[in-house]
Image: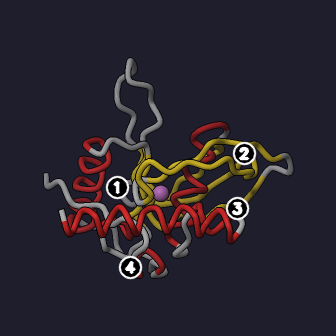
């Protein structure tokens, strides 16, 4: 497995809309394996393929706690078919927005349909952190970051901070 580098904002590649995968084959599974490894190493609880520069509808997630065994979840071509009416607030972060967090409301529960690692059609009802993580990753597939759901002022503040950090890294 290969650890890949995660693209950080601001970067045009994060705004690309991802395309559905046509067949779940070994090539797709290799990308998923690398994504999972990259996500664990970061460390993070969710990663979309577009964050490693592959604009395909592929997501890896693992919301198990550190003291639990790993519980990787692979979502291929996911589609949310139901959202709960009640919203939940959560202090959200993103591997593409290092060290940036913001409180964000999203539907508390969802039902998502997707293909699994073996190409089998699945349906999952998710609540809490898992529901949050799936919605966040699916935003990535649409070319959206969580900061795009904040006010322009808050978004600008975060992106300027990251831009500055990036330029310091280049000149350091
Ligand atoms: Ni993210």
Q: Residue at x 75, y 57 (%)?
A: 82
Q: Which mark is residue 109?
A: 2
Residue 120 seen by the camera: no
Closer mark to the observer between disc 1 and disc 2 = 2
Residues at marks 1 and 4, CA–CA distance in whole angstroms: 28 Å
Q: Which mark is residue 81?
A: 3
Dot 1 or dot 2, earlier in sequence: 2
Closer mark to the observer between disc 4 and disc 2 = 4
Q: In this view of the protein, which residue sits in the foreground, 122 or 136?
A: 136
Q: Residue at x 44, y 25 (%)?
A: 65
User: How many numbered callouts?
Assistant: 4
Residues at marks 3 and 4, CA–CA distance in whole angstroms: 27 Å
> Disc 4 marks which residue?
13
- In the image, is residue 43 above or below residue 157? above
Residue 83 seen by the camera: yes
Dot 1 or dot 4, earlier in sequence: 4
């Amino acid at each position: 497995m290969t650890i890949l580098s995660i693209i950080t904002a601001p970067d045009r590649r994060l705004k690309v809309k991802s395309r559905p995968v046509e067949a779940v084959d070994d090539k797709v599974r290799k990308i998923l394996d690398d994504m999972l490894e990259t996500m664990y190493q970061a460390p993070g609880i969710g990663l979309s393929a577009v964050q490693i520069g592959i604009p395909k509808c592929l997501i890896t997630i693992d919301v198990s706690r550190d003291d639990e065994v790993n519980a990787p979840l692979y979502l291929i071509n996911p589609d949310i078919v139901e959202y709960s009416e009640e919203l939940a607030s959560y202090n959200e972060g993103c591997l593409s927005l290092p060290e940036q967090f913001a409180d964000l409301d999203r539907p508390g529960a969802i039902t998502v349909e997707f293909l699994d690692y073996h190409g089998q059609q699945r349906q999952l009802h998710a609540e809490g952190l898992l529901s949050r993580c799936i919605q966040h990753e699916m935003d990535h597939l649409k070319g959206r970051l969580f900061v795009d759901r904040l006010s322009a002022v808050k978004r600008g503040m975060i992106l300027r901070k990251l831009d500055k950090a990036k330029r310091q890294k280049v000149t350091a």
